[in-house]
Image (spheres, coloured by chain):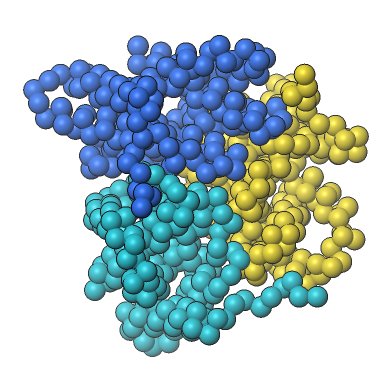
Chain colours: A cyan, B yellow, C blue
């Protein structure tokens, strides 16, 4: 179940990379790389920072195959991809929920402080998009608008809050993932952003 | 003493990140991330390159707390931050002096060549600013003007020069740190830059 | 022999970095850094991802000295560097052929999947140029035009094809390197690019 969602998230991230690379008129190779980087960039940074090498995607070929297939699919059906926008948004949202949990779990395994674990979860979920934007020469979108990383942080915090209660740890994981997903959905639905710090 | 200066440097780097992020109209999360990256980016690159993982800031929460507090302080008092410009410049200058020494020491512990140790010191001191500029989509300022990294390199070189003399190693560290700081101060005071290589 | 070609490749990459940095009016320090990053960036990423630390160039000072010498040479003779353009292109082409093989070999040593080994080879050969372009605030040139990484990928694939035949492994390495070089030369000679995916 976890693994299935993980793959759905990977597909959504890969396709989001393809769409941004298209806008930059990259060639086939560039598009594939951006798809790859968007999908595995967050987990790679996490693995490097905690010293978990060779990094995860090098040890399980499923990711590579899924990303290449998603990218080729997105390239072939690029004119129809708009019809999938809602599905992609849902995949992406479920993806960041799960990626956040994967990051937290890796941090716990390395016996790191809860705040660092939350940071690792947020990184896993959002750094692929940051890398995508840097490679496409844009200021990373998550630094400028939308509740995105904030959803990951709050979901991660809820994990460490609920884990202290007498609840089964699998259920706590489920709750934390749902917190990420629901905050993200509500934020997009109601166009909630972080408080503006530039008002006069 | 060392630790106190280290913290002062961290504060100065974090605030410098906040100021650049402000100019780019980033949201609260973006500002915090840029503050964090500016403050710990150099040490993180150093740790990754020599294989010192999990990276330092993950193992000592002081940095995280100091950076978050500095960023919040800078956000709240952003209209008054100009009054602190001189203090911040001094913190930053002392910070790069110390960061250079920290990098050299880590290189020595890993038994690397003096030239590599100097590179690690310079990296520790200056790479946070480079990352800050890349994330803000600017050509890194240290590649274009001012004696900055050069001060770190000369300070690092002076360490390996003086360590051959019969001087206590703590004093050599002090001298090397002062070399960085004094060169940086003189360069800013007298507007010294590297020789122009573009003149006809 | 391998080592000599490796050094020629390093020289070519370093000089290509100097030329790009010049266009961006970087100062002396910036030019040196870009030269360095272009020359060792690919190998550094590869080493980090597979956990081979301290990274290679920190353990063999030859690279550092060769890069500094190349950069100084390029700076001094910058007005004459156009006469060397063909030689540089050949060095660069031989360089990516060899760098691809170095990357594959490191992947094999870490017992990674052939597809990952090819990715490591391509990364070793091309990521220095990507980093150069990111630091110079350009969209990486290899994402937009020319058969470059594609040559590395095909050369890498040919290695895993021929290694199954009863041929001496040194000869297979030679063939794979030649595949990279010949594809790159033909692509530039006949202006071959990847199929345009933007045609209507």
Q: Is residue A37 above or below residue B161?
A: below
**Image position of C2 (left or right of C85):** left
**Image position of B144 (left or right of C131):** right
Q: Quadrant of the C terminus of chain B?
A: top right
The answer to whether one can see residue C126 in this image is yes
Residue visible at 9% across and 26% down in the picture:
C165
Residue visible at 35% across and 24% down in the picture:
C190
Residue C33, x across and y down, in percent:
61, 31
Residue C91, x across and y down, in percent:
44, 17
Residue visible at 60% across and 39% down in the picture:
C136
Residues B60 and C131: in front is: C131
Residue A146, x across and y down, in percent:
55, 73
Q: Is residue A181 above or below residue C129?
A: below
Farthest residue to the front: give it.
C200
Q: Is residue B43 above or below residue C90?
A: below
**Image position of B122 (left or right of C94):** right
Residue visible at 51% across and 55% down in the picture:
A133
**Image position of A160 (left or right of A88):** right
The answer to whether one can see residue A63 in this image is no
Q: Is residue B31 above or below residue B186?
A: below
The total number of labels drawn is: 0
Residues A61 and C145: in front is: C145
Residues A136 and B29: in front is: A136
């Amino acid at each position: 179940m976890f693994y299935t969602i993980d793959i759905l998230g990977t597909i959504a991230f890969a396709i989001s990379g393809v769409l941004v690379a298209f806008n930059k008129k990259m060639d086939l190779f560039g598009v594939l790389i951006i798809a790859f980087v968007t999908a595995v960039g967050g987990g790679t940074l996490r693995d490097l920072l905690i010293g978990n090498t060779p990094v995860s995607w090098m040890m399980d070929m499923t990711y590579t195959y899924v990303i290449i297939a998603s990218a080729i699919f997105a390239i072939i059906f690029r004119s129809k991809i708009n019809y999938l926008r809602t599905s992609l948004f849902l995949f992406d949202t479920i993806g960041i929920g799960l990626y956040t949990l994967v990051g937290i779990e890796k941090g716990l395994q390395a016996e790191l402080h809860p705040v660092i674990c939350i940071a690792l979860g947020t990184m896993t979920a959002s750094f692929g998009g940051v890398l995508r934007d840097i490679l496409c020469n844009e200021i990373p979108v998550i630094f400028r608008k939308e509740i995105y990383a904030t959803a990951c942080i709050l979901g991660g915090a809820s994990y460490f809050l609920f884990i202290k209660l007498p609840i089964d740890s699998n259920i706590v994981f489920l709750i934390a993932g749902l917190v990420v997903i629901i905050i993200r959905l509500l934020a997009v639905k109601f166009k909630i952003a972080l408080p503006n710090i530039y008002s006069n």
